[in-house]
Amino acid sequence: VIRTPSVDWAALSPDLILLCAAGLLLLVAVVVRDRLARDAAGVIGLGAFAAAMVATGVIWDDHGGRTTTLGGEIVVDRFANGVRLIVAVAGILSLFAAYGWSRMRERGPEFAALLLTAAAGMDFLAASNGFVTLFVSLELFSITLYTLCAFDVRSPVSLESGLKYLVLGSIGSAVLLYGAAFLYGSTGSLQFGGIAHALAGGKRTDILALAGTALVLCGLGFKIAVVPFHMWSPDVYEGAPTPVTGFMAAATKTAAFAALVRVLTEALPSQADYWRPALAVGAIVTMVVGNVAALAQSNLKRMLAYSSIAHAGYLLMAVIAQGDLARQALLFYLLVYTAMTVGSFAVIAAHERETGEPATIESIRGFGLARPVLGAALAIFLLSLGGFPPTAGFLAKVYVFSAAIDSGYTYLAVVGAITTVVSLGYYLRVGMALYDRRATPRAVTGVPGYASAGIAAVAGVALVLWLGVYPPDVLDWAHQAARSLSAGS
Amino acid sequence: MTIGASQLVLIPLVGAVLLAILPLPRTLAGPIALLFSLAVTGGVAGLAYRFDVGDGFQFSTDKVWIPSLGIRYHVAIDGLSLALLAMTALVSTCAIGYAVWEGRSRTRLYFALLLVLESALVTVFVARDLILFYVGFEAMLIPFYFLIGIYGGAHRRRATLKLIIYTFVGTLLMLVGILTLGLGAKGGPAFGFDQVGTSDERWVFLTFALAFAIKSPLWPFHGWLPDAYRAAPPEVAALLSGVASKAGAYGFLRLALPLFPKQAVELRWWIVTLATIGLLYGSIVAFRQPDSRGVIAYSSVGQMGLIVLGIFLISARGEDGAVLQMVNHGVLSAALFLIAGWLAVTTGAERFDQLGGLARGRPILATVCIVVGVATLAVPGSSTFASEFLILLGAFESHWYLGAIAATAIVLSAMYMLRWISAVLHDREGPAVGATRPPDLRSGALGAVLPLVVAMLVLSFVPNAVTRRVDAPTKALATGALEYLP
C-alpha cells in the first residue's frame, strides 16, 4: 500500500490560486481575441496575484507561522510567505508594465499564464524543504522564464535571449542537481533537516559533502547571477522583452536568494566555515565587477543587468551575516529592490514602445522633460538604486550594511560603500540624460501605453518612498519572517 | 500648532510637494516658494525670541522612526543650531528671492528643488540622531544634483558628477562608521548623538573626518569646488558655499569632536595643518582668479580652512570664533554670489577684463559691493573682524607661528577682496559694461541682496548675539577633547 502524504491545502492555497488562474487563462485564450484577450489576461492575472496575497495574509499565523506538509517536502513558514508576497508584488507591477505591449493583444492570456506559473514555481522554491522539491520548482519557473524570454517570437534578439538562457540556465540546474546528488551520497538524505543532521553527526568534512556543498552553491549562484556565474544575465536581460526582464530580475532574485538562505541555514549550517569565506569573496567580486562593468554600458537594460549583478553582491552580505537582522535585511532589500527594478523596467518598456528601438542613454535624453511622470519615476528609482536617502534604497543599504557589521564583516560594508560610489557613475549619468535640456524630443512611432506603465511606475515610486520614509510596519513584517526561519533551524 | 524644530524641516517640504503636484501657473511657483521660505525664516525668528540661553536643547521632537535598529526621529535646537539655522533660513530666502528676480525655466520643478534643499539643510542642523543627520547630509545632494545638472551653466554635467561623487565617497564611508558606532552602542543599537557614547576607533573617526573634510572642503579635498561653484546658478552656488559647506564644519564640531575626543586630539595637527595650508592656498589662488566666482570659490576654501582651524584649536575662543565665522561667511559668500549673478545677468560678462567702472552712476551697487567686500576682508568693526580675531587669539594662545600664519592669510584676504572691488567698481570701464550700460542695483535683485547686507551690519554691531548663544554648547562639545589635551 502506498501511503499518500497529508496535504495542508490552506498552506498551499496561494500557489494553487496562481496555478488555477494560469489554467483558466489558457482556456480563455482559446475563446477570446485581441483587446478582450488582453483585458482578460490583465484582470485574471491581477486578480490571481491579489488573491494569492490575501491568502498569504490569511495563513500568515497558521500553526504558529510554520507549516510542514507534503511529507516534509514543503515548509510554509513566514519566510516563504514573505517571498510569496514579494513575488506577487513583482508580478502585479510586471503585468502593468506589460499591459501596453503589442504582444499582449496577440497572446495576452498565454503571457499572463506563464507569468503566474513562474510565480508559483518561485513560491515553491522558497518553500522547498528538500532538494527534490527545490529542483522541481526551480525547473518549473526556469522553463517558464525561458519561454517568456523568447515570447516576442518575431524578434531575433528575444529568441536568442531565450535560447541563451535555456542553455546556460540548464547548466546551472545540472550543477545544482549534481551537488544535491553528492550530498545525498554523503548523508543519505535529500531533505534539508536530514542533511543537516547527518553533517552535524560527523560528516562535516566528508569529501562528498564538501563537493556537494560547493556544487549546490555554484548552481544557485547561476540563478542569482553572482560573479563568476553572471555571464548569461546581461545578454538575457538585454534580449528579453522588457516587462519580462523586470519580472525576471526582481522575482527570480527573490526566490533564489530565499532558497539559498534556506539551504545554507537548514541543510548546511555545519558547513558555515567553508561557505562563509567563499561567499564573502563572491560578494566582493560581484559588487566590484557588477558596478565597474555597468559603467561601460550605454544600453539601459544591459546597464541595469550589471547593476542587478552588483545588487546581488549587496544581498550576499545579508546571506553571509548571521542572525535575524541579516534575514530581515535580506527580505527588506528584496522588496525594495523589486519595487525599484520592476518600476524602472516599466518606464524603459514604455520608452521603448514609444521609440521602437532599444533604450540607450542617447535615446532617453530629454525623456524626463517630455514625460514628467515617467521621467521623475525613473529618476527616483535610480536614486533609490544608488542608495540616496530618503528613498527606500538607502534604508535597504543601511540594513544590509548593519547586518554585515553586526556579524563582524565590516570590510564587506566598506567594499559595499566604495562600490556604491562607483555605481553613482552610471545611475547619475542616466538621471542627467533624462533631464537634458538640449535634447530634441523623439518622434512617437509606436503605441506607448503610458497609462499602464504609469501605474506601475507610480506604484513603484509610492512603495520606494513609503518604505524609505515610514518603514516600521514592513520591517516588522520582515522581522517576523526572519524569525520563523531561524526558529526552524 | 506651535513651531518647533520639526516644523522647520516640514514647512519647506510641504511647500515642495505642493509645488510639485499642484497645477499652478508657472509665474506663481517662485512667489509661493518665497512665502514658504519666509515662513521658515519667521519660524526661526520666533524660536530665537523664545530661546532660553541658559537651557540646553529646546523645541525638540523625539519619535521612534525605525524601532529594530533604534533609529529615532529626534530633532532639537541649541544655541549652535540656532545660529546656523538663522543663517540657513536667511540665505535660503534670499536665494529664492534672487531666483524669482532672475527668472528660471520650469519653475515648479526648480523652486520645489530649492525648498527640498532648504529642508535637507535644516535637517542637518537640527538632527540629534546620526542616521537622521546622515539623511539630511546626503539628501541635500539630490536637489544639488538636479539644480546644477539641469539648470547649470557650461560644463554643468562634469561639475555635478564631480560634486556628487566626491561627496559620496566621504559620506558612504561615514555611513559604515555611523553603523559601527550605533551598533556598538551600549544597550543595543542606538544612533542618538547622546546615546552612541564616545569611541576610540581611529578608522571610524577618519570616516567622519573624511566626509566633513570633503564637504567643507578642506585642502586637498576641494577638487569638486571650483567647477561646482562656476557651473551652478548663482543662488545655488550661494546655498552651496554659504550653507552646505557649513554642514561639513558643523559636523566636525558637533560630531567629530565630542564623539571621538581622543582621536580628535591625537590627529588634530594633521587637520590643523591641512586647514592652514588650505587657508594660505585658497587665499593666494583667489588673488589670481579671472572672474568673481573664482575669487569667491577659492576664498571659500581659505575661509573654511580658517573655520576648521578654529574648531580644532579646541579652545573656547577658537570654537566661538569658528561658529561666528561660519555665520559671517555664510551670509557674505551668499551675498557675493548673488552680486556676481546680478553682474553676469546685467552685463552678460563674468570675467574681470570685461567688467570695471561700474561704480560710476550706480551708488547703490557701489555701496553694497563695498560693504560686503570690506566685511569679507575683516575690517575692524565688522563682525568678521570679531570672529577672525577670536580665532587668531586662539591660534596665538596655542602656538605663535600658527597665529602668525593665520594673520598672514587675513592680509591675503584683503588683497583679493580689494582686487575684486577695484576690478568690478573701479578701473577703466570694461567693454561689457560699455556695451550693455547696466542700470543700478534695484528692486528685485536689491531686495534679495539687501537682507544679507543688513544682517551683516547688525551682526557687526552685536556679534555677541551669536557668541552669547553658542558659547555654552561649544564648550560642552569640546569638554571631552579638553581632557586629552596635553
Image (tube, rainbow, N blue to C red):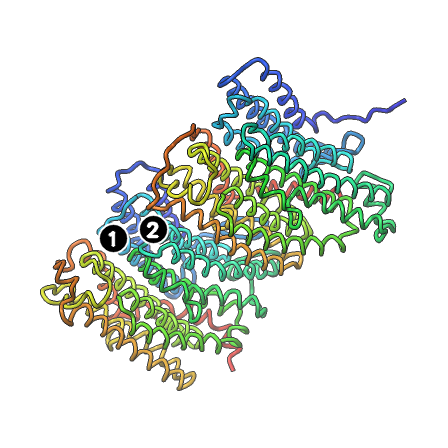
Q: Please state, as top left, top right, bottom left or bottom right, where the N terminus of chain A lies in the image.
A: top right
Residue lying at the far right of the rendered structure: A1
Residue lying at the far bottom of the rendered structure: B400
Q: Position of residue A345 (x, y in %)?
A: 51, 38
Residue lying at the far front of the rendered structure: A156
Amino acid type at circle 2 is Leu
Q: Position of residue B129 (x, y in %)?
A: 49, 57
Whether residue A469 is visible, yes or no, is: no
The numbered disc on residue B175 is none
Please indicate whether residue A231 sits to the left or right of residue B139 in the image. Answer: right
Q: Residue at x 38, y 68 (%)?
A: B470
Comparing A371 with A433, the one in front is: A433
Q: Residue at x 53, y 37 (%)?
A: A342
Q: Residue at x 33, y 58 (%)?
A: B231
Q: Position of residue A149 (x, y in %)?
A: 59, 33
Please indicate whether residue B135 sits to the left or right of residue B108 in the image. Answer: right
Amino acid type at circle 1 is Gly
Crowd around label 2: few <14 · some 14–19 · many ≥20 (10 Å) = many
Residue that label 2 marks? B114
Residue that label 1 marks? B97
Q: Position of residue B39 (x, y in %)?
A: 30, 50
Comparing A426 with B255, the one in front is: A426
Comparing B22 with A364, the one in front is: A364
Q: Please state, as top left, top right, bottom left or bottom right, where the C terminus of chain A lies in the image.
A: top right
Chain letter belonging to callout 2: B
Whether labels 2 and 1 share one chain: yes
**Relative to residue B177, is residue A434 depicted above or below?**
above
**Label 2 SS:** helix
